[in-house]
Image (spheres, grey):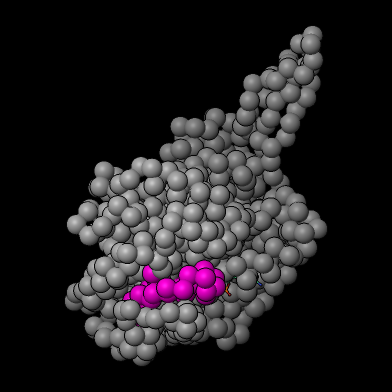
Amino acid sequence: MSTLPSFLAGAWRGGAGEGVPVADAVTGETVTRVSSEGLDLAAAVAYARRTGLAALGELTFPERAAALKAAALALQERRQELYELSARAGATRADAAVDVDGGIGTALVYASLARKGLPDHTVIVEDDPVPLGKGGTFAGRHVLTTPRGISLQINAFNFPVWGMLEKLAPALLAGLPTIVKPATPTAYIAEHAVRIIESALPPGAIQLVCGPVPGLFDVLGGQDHIGFTGSADTAARLRSDPAVTRRSARFNAEADSLNCAVLGPDAVPGQPEFDLYADALVTEMTVKAGQKCTAIRRAFVPAHLIDAVAEAVAARLARVVVGAPGAEGVTMGALAGLAQREDVRAAVARLAAAGSIVYGDPDKVEVAGADAERGAFLSPLLLRVDDVARSEPHEVEAFGPVSTLMPYGTVAELAGLIARGEGSLAGSVVSYDPGFVRQVVLGAAAHHGRILVLDRDSAGESTGHGTPMPQLVHGGPGRAGGGEEEGGLRAVYAHLQRTALQGSPATLDSIVK
Ligand code: NAP
């Protein structure tokens, strides 16, 4: 079997050697082998700086938006192919829609935001002249220009399409050529997506390297942008590379987090918010088999409601059908691979030591349409930790269909518990009591990149706890990586260099016109 090709310097090239086998998450068969051995990554960076930067530099913002839109439409046309590949990674049709359609939608939103919100130019003038002298002859203003570098994106395995497009869109609009480094377990899905879009983009605007990237950071520096999504451990390793610490390459990290969802004391059984909470928890546990960085890991409920919530969630989980994507009745697919399942089991063992499992068995699950052991299947697992002073539920991320219920007493106690996650991507407050919602949101905002308030009024249109929206910021402080992606045009600005210009107002005008 030849290795999965990379797309470098305008051509598809396979890495040498045997490569690392990637197994089908459902059957265990080898899907592909991944190797970057012998690929000239320094040449790829040079090609991006020369060819990609020049080609994108010739386009104005609206023209780049048009190229992005063409790429998104090419994917839309052939999305069935991506759904089929996603099934091999354990994703049901609904899971694949989150990744594939979510990615396409994100790219289209960016194309539209850029068309409406960016000038027909290659430079953005941020402000009007700010007077800096009494006589009006000296002023300042800020411009945003394209760095002379590249955007390297390093992605996690769980969103091979969305993860790529949400980073590609702002980089492309900013005029930066991209090198995509997908995670090995799902690199074959990213590879197929790049095949579909590369001809819609200017030469050098996108390259792909499947497999490890030794030496790549050595040729990156202050004009380059590195966008990382993955575990906190890898983020810590990469951000300590001299490319970042000495040469000041921009480094943005989206890491794991122990996201919370809070049920308000008003939301007793019989109130719509009680059901909304139980539904949201089950959705977050089962979509993509819980392999979402934004999934709810810590479910805080009033102490007097914890039994009722456990019962309601368990009843819903009992209706989940685990099995092969596409098999009759299946509502939850497999994890991405057997190694991921082992990681989740180990994390669940640590969590369970602090409390108990109230639903599911980490070692046993009934599976429809596949073999439970050959495929990376796992039961949804609801845990309960009453001793909230324990560290495990606030520290251990089980990256699968796993969530932990915890009781709280006062709002002040709740605020302290939320903070123990040390920074999260997303949090939810489910309550119809505006006073409670206000207190919790203002207390929790400093620890979150995004907070959803869910109640009977917004539920019909709500996009849900776990879904990052391209218009809104995605990222979080502390453990969540300290980065910020999306947020509409903010992400484009984050790829550009801001320069303060000073001079006479007329001179400044002549520069930026
Ligand atoms: P990971 O093991 O940290 O890997 C992430 C990426 O880093 C992969 O592409 C990996 O490549 C690459 N990588 C590892 N070592 C590297 C090195 N020395 N140089 C360059 N690249 C390197 O994480 P994962 O297992 O793929 O993803 C799961 C984790 O990501 C979870 O903890 C989850 O919470 C987090 N996550 C966060 C977000 C977010 O938006 N915040 C989104 C999704 C997932 P290989 O695969 O080839 O090793």
Residue 71 as seen in the image, left or right of residue 118: left
Q: Residue at x 74, y 58 (%)?
A: 244
Towards the viewer: 117 or 201 = 117
Residue 384 as seen in the image, left or right of residue 432: right
Reply above or below: 335 against 116.
below
Q: Residue at x 33, y 50 (%)?
A: 431
Residue 221 as seen in the image, left or right of residue 286: right
The magenta region covers: 377-405
Residue 63 place in picture, x, y as percent: 51, 38
Towards the viewer: 70 or 134 = 134
Towards the viewer: 75 or 282 = 282
Residue 140 place in picture, x, y as percent: 74, 23
Reply above or below: 140 against 180.
above
Is any part of residue 172 visible from this angle?
no
Residue 119 place in picture, x, y as percent: 54, 30
Residue 388 as seen in the image, left or right of residue 498: left
Asked if residue 13 is among those painted magenta in the image, a careful observer would answer: no
Q: Residue at x 52, y 40 (%)?
A: 489
Residue 491 place in picture, x, y as percent: 55, 45
Q: Residue at x 46, y 61 (%)?
A: 259
Task: Indicate the quadrant of ligand 1 in the picture.
Answer: bottom right
Asked if residue 384 is among those painted magenta in the image, a careful observer would answer: yes
Towards the viewer: 100 or 452 = 452
Reply above or below: 181 against 173.
below
Which of the 4 quarters of the picture holds residue 311? bottom left
Is any part of residue 133 visible from this angle?
yes
Quarter of the image with the C terminus is top right
Q: How many marks?
A: 0
